[in-house]
Image (cartoon, rainbow, N blue to C red):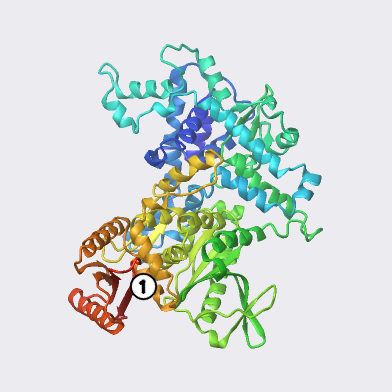
Amino acid sequence: MRQVLEKIDELISKKGFVYALIMAQIEDESIATVNIEKRNNQERLSANEILFLWSLLVNKGDFWQYPSDFDELYSMRSEIPRLMEELHFTFFSGVASHVQDIMNGKLAEFKPYYDGAVFQEAIFYSGGALYDEEYIYYTKKRYEEDDQWLKEHKGYDKDEFCDIASKIKQTVWNKIRRFRLQSLPETWEQQLKNKPSELTEEQFRKELTLWQFFYNQEEQLTIQEFCDRLKDAISFTKEDIVEYDGAENYLKLFSVEPSKGCNEACKEPGDLSILMSSPVIKTSVGSYLVSEAQQLFKSMYDTPRYWLYEQLDEHKKIGSHTGDFSEVQTLRVLKGIFGKNCYKDVIVCKGKNQETDIDALCIWKDYAICFQIKSKGLTLASRQGNLESIRKDFTKSFQAAYKQGLKCREALLHQTDYRFEDKKTRQTITLPSLREVYIVCETSDEYPSLTHQMAVLLNREPSEPAALAVNVFDVSVMGLYLNEPYYFMHYVHNRQKHYDNTRTDVELNCLAAYTYNRLNLEGGEYDAFMFDNSYAKAIDAELLPQYAKHKDVTVDNSAWRNGTFDALVKEIDSSPHYGLGQVVLGLLNFSRDEVKQIGMKINELLQKGAAGKDEYYCFRKGDFGFTFVVMEMGTKQEVHSFIQAVSLDEIKKNKSKNWLTIAHFLSSNSLVGTLAYVSGK
């Protein structure tokens, strides 16, 4: 890594490099918000990479010299992604040595995660946890209790500072919008196919790269004028935020003036950078520029916590509840889905003794989800790839939460030996007998590569269930898409069931995949899945435009559901019989396309039935299948005997373990007249 970092240092030391960096920043950050579903994450710098380059640059001091010409500027711009890719590969040098040792017989087993650099890579290149507007929302919620102290002692006004950050972002974006970035084709390859024959590919690529930053084809600019335009595009002045009383305080707290050695601690990915807490860079002419757009909001969410932690020893109440808001926000989402069947702070007692507690408990039918919420984040040493620190951070947060979850799960599945109480009222909570209890470990902080670490580092016995690892922000988005208790439960059910066969970087990738295939691996041609960050683009594409317009966020779940099928599931769910939980979970295993086909077929059967014909059709998915029968209503015994016989017959014919037969009566407005479920398990 050291050799590559030396090359990067040589590049950023060149006159005019800052303008090449601004070009990359404008391209990659703005394109990330346009045509989101078509963007290629592999071809753009990540937010962390952009911030890292700025971090190295501000440590140089004065860096505003102009490049000699456009050729030199383009050369530096082209070098940035090449060197950053080279840097990326250095994280795996230990893995290469590991493989070589196996080939040479020095090691018998492939264990790539013995090297802290592999985790450092996963942490540094992890996808972002929040959208800008989510940072704003959670910043205001996180510091509600400490608002007065922060105003008096730090001059930090969370509400006004969030408005200032938004105004800065909008000011910069209005300038960037004048460029022709949105006119670029989906891929370079498409444009290169149509290049003029007299130009080489590299010459044409250069023209396209520079062409984006001219307002029109007739415009003529000198290299100095071109660079000044780039600098101005990500800059703002005090006059742009003069309307806010706290503008001076904001700039004092969140800006830095570059000087030689001002960011000496940041030398490689994962190091602490002054730009993490002060992302605004002051220029020598009195203007300010944005080093990385999202850091404007992330710094407001993270930085006050450190100010508050400094006061904990002296003033126990100050900052002591910065992690409590996670429980509050999680309960807000879960209550909206599970209603009265969502419980907060459940005490688990055995005899007269308190055994443990559950932060949030959600009950649906005879299934439950046990949330264990912690506020521990990643330490600096972990971000730098210290394997011992990575394991220690994980143990204190998620391993501890998992062990607690196992205790709670045992109690919930064997309730005769335990008693459950509301922590606040100490009243006994009566719970139904449960078939299964799922464990969700949650953190109130961003925890980069959390899902990956959970899959690799969690210490559990083969007989113990997997657990889902999320942050409070994941739960918020999950609540938008999984807005019915059975969908939420089914998602967690399938995530746990196939956890060992699924790998991803962030949970939203799995959530996006769920809307397509329900994360159901049974009966397919693959026995394992890896979901990269391209999956979450579908969620970004739906939510980002709404956040940008400051609208109340809603999602169009009709894109992956079907009205007829959903009505069928809802009717079964509305039954008071708790044992029907496994029936609903079986139905929800059908994929997006299958659900649409089922809905169409049911509607077709209903139309034929209206013409006086008895009709039926069978649907099957793995070990589960169901038959939908349209028939005249007979006696209760006759109907039950008939549909029971249908289920038994289909199990024999299809060699399935579970079969559901649903009878729809022609004289009824309900889809489900009665049903029979036969399980061979």
Q: Is residue 470 visible?
A: yes
Q: Relative to residue 47, is residue 562 drawn left or right?
A: left
| Quarter of the figure with residue 524 | bottom left
Q: Relative to residue 59, is residue 620 drawn left or right?
A: left
Return the x and y of residue 511 as percentages of the image width and height: 43, 56
In the image, 367 versus 351, the foreground residue is 367
In the image, 573 versus 535, the foreground residue is 573
Residue for point 53% across, 38% down: 548
Residue for point 33% across, 22% down: 204
Residue for point 52% across, 58% down: 475
Q: Relative to residue 157, is residue 546 drawn left or right?
A: left
In the depicted structure, whether residue 161 falls above or below residue 347? above
Return the x and y of residue 115 as percentages of the image width and height: 47, 57
Return the x and y of residue 501 as percentages of the image width and height: 36, 64
Q: Where does the C terminus fall, quadrant-wise?
A: bottom left
Q: Secondary structure at mark 1?
A: helix
